[in-house]
Amino acid sequence: MREIHLQTPLSAKDIKKLSIGDTVFLSGKLFTARDQAHKKMIELKKKAKKIPFSPKEMVLYHAGPVARKEKNKWAIVSAGPTTSARMESFEKEFLSLFGVKMIIGKGGMGRETLKALKKAGAVYVHFTGGAGALAAKSIKKVENVYFLEELGIPEAVWILRIEKFGPLIVTMDAKGNSFYEKKEKVATKAQRHKEKQQK
Amino acid sequence: MAKISKKNIEEILIEAIEKAETELPKDVIKALKNAAYIEKGLAKIQMEAILENIKIASKEGIPMCQDTGIMTFYIQAGTEFKYLADLKKMLENAVKRATKETPLRPNTVNPFTGENSGDNLGRNIPYISWDMVKGSECIIHILPKGGGSENMSALWMLNSAEGFDKAKKLIVEHIINAGGQPCPPTIAGIGIGGGADICMQLAKKSLLRKIGEPHREKKVAKMEKELFELINKTGIGPMGMGGATTVLDVHIEYAHRHPASFPVGLVLQCWANRRKVIKFEKNGSIKVI
């Protein structure tokens, strides 16, 4: 198990060296997007409307934070990852439209995303579910927030400055390997073995 | 311990909600520490991140998870409890204020319009389950439950002849398929019997029980232990990273069933098993546990 520290914007070289099981700590900039934000951004892009920030410079984070406004400035209180499977139907298109190189989420994603990651030269990294306070500690600044009025706090797109954000575990790499597919195989095998014994 | 007055009940409720969101009960912390100790590799990294996370949350008084859940209250109220008539309103006010003051994430969305009410209040939410008893005491269990684990709930209306064998198989399979999604190590709450709604209610209510506390009936406790072992043998492990701890505990509650039915409900609770209990005592004092 390797520990790797990365800085955004990520380069193709950064991504290439990542393999399943590596632990990453990330610094730089990320944007949050859940299902509604994915839908919204894809719609805008398709209508050739301008996205008000540059997604490919940042990392995509599947998360809906707790945020508080203090003296007219937003602060993130708690911001762990949300279940990535909800974004599966959008991710292939999202990756090809926005050129994001890293997705942070929890629980993993499916085969379509795995293929899209390979094509885009991107990786999926897992962050500990529920680790909202730990995440907030690494979030240094809210740079901006988009679609807040329309989508509400959890679904809005938050642009966040982060420092040593992690531990993030690479679970889907850019070479077409997925930790989840391996696990699935092991689980089915174990189940079959058990059933055989019961018979 | 504090004396009750109408004025300070709301403050105490807000504080209890905040404590529920920022500090885990001792039994949960103990179980998580134990899991961190026995796990290895990637699973250990997950457990250590969880322990670090709960430490930061309680030290800084911030929600341990950004999904502060939908507020659910289980109330056992004495019919002579002095504030019975006002309690629902007080709880709603407390939720609304805690949303701003703690703060909590606004989690109540109108399914038809998609609009988020912004204050964690909405139709039938917070959800309150009432149980009336004799006397003047009142016990309120607070259970803020997140969406990720709730989405992994299941209901099976089994053929009564298939019963427990089928139920055990389905539960284990379901937990394998859920993988890391419900944020394991989870607590599996299982409700058996009654009807579709009743078994689901029982499954969720079983989560109020402490980790490590078996059902008071031996036969049920035996089933809990058997399922605990079966599920942990799946190797799903913390956050689905592979390991020995997929569940911290299994809790079963039951109701008598109709001869034709064998309803089984499963509700998973994530590792952030947030619970608080408020007790209004006979002598007028109030305790938050």
Image (cartoon, helix red, strand yellow):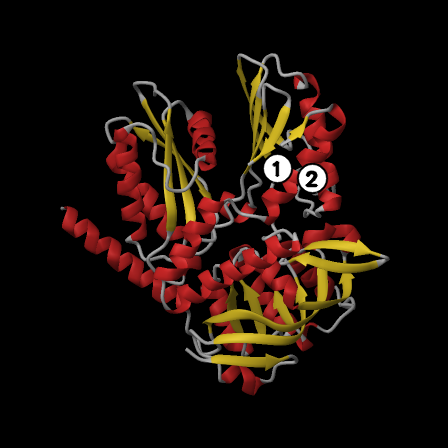
Q: In the image, is residue B286 above or below residue B178?
A: above
Q: Secondary structure at mark 1?
A: loop
Q: On the image, which quarter does residue B11 sit in?
A: top right
Report helix, strand or loop for mark 2. Answer: loop
> What residue appears at the point 54 percent right and 40 percent down from the top-left corner?
B275
Give the crowd class for mark 2: few <14, some 14-19, many >=20 residues within 10 Å: many
**Picture disc at residue B71:** 1
CA–CA distance between discs 2 and 1? 8 Å
Q: What residue type is disc 1 on?
A: Met
Marks 2 and 1 share the same chain: yes
Residue designated by label 2: B120
Marked residue nearer the N-terminal end (2 or 1): 1
In the figure, is residue B214 to the left or right of A62? left
Q: Residue B288: x, y in percent?
A: 59, 35
Q: Nearer the viewer, residue B139 or A128?
A: B139
Residue B230 in sight in this render: yes
Residue at coordinates 62% horizontally, 32% vertically from top-left? B1
Q: Which mark is residue B124?
A: none
Across and down, in percent, residue B58 comes to: 60, 53
Look at the picture and state if B80 lies above or below B127: above
Label pair 2/1, CB-CB below 8 angstroms: yes
Locate residue B121, reporting x and y percent. Answer: 70, 35
Q: Position of residue B108 (x, y in %)?
A: 67, 40
In the image, residue B208 above or below residue B52 = above
Q: Is residue B152 visible?
A: no
Instruction: Tell me which amino acid carries mark 2.
Output: Asn
**The residue marked by circle 2 belongs to what chain?**
B
